[in-house]
Amino acid sequence: MFKNRTLSVLLLFVTINLFGFLVQKGFIPTRFKINFILVVNAMLLLMYFVNAIRIRQLDKTNPNALIRSVMVGTLLKMVVFVTAAMVYTTQVKAPVGMPTLMASMGLYLFYTWLEIKGELYNK
């Protein structure tokens, strides 16, 4: 399971967490709500591993199954992302903010790109 694509996703996770640590300690000023971004980052990593396990169990000779599985994984990640935003706004009683949502959406897209790139090119 630990191939190059998994190592690149883990490297992304560690890099984002390191950035969050530096922001929380005050070394890097930012307009982001860093706690929200860190939670989204952890949820996206978890969803990556769930999707990797699900895709590994597919029939590799059926390309339609691979496409459907990637589409379902992308939809699941989007639902998790939207749910995190809704829970955050109801719990904190404050808006998330557009820069934070855009940064989280960028993370979502980057995790999805790494997942799709890894599944298509590293069979």
Image (spheres, rainbow, N blue to C red):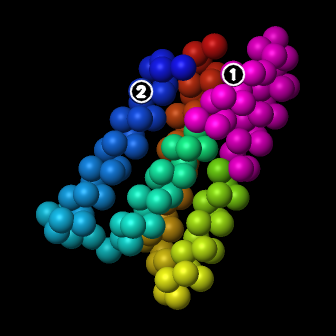
Name the spot of residue 8 as percent of width and height, x first: 42, 30
The dominant secondary structure in magenta is: helix
Q: Which residue extends farthest bottom?
A: 93
Amino acid residing under circle 1: Arg
Residue lying at 30% horizontally and 58% vertically, measured from the top left: 20
Query: How far is the residue under mark 2 from the one under mark 1?
Result: 17 Å
The magenta region covers 49-76
Residue 58 point in image, percent of width and height: 78, 21
Residue at the image point whose x is 65% and y is 50% from the top: 77
**For the N terminus, which image quadrant?**
top right
Is 73 in the magenta?
A: yes
Examine the structure image and report whether residue 117 is included in the region drawn in magenta: no
- Up the image or down, 41 lies above or below 58; here it is below
- Residue 107 drawn at (x, y percent): 48, 51
Residue 112 seen anywhere in this rendered image of the structure: no
Q: Name the residue under label 1.
A: 56
**Circle 2 — which element?**
helix
39 shown above or below 87: above
Mark 2, residue position: 7
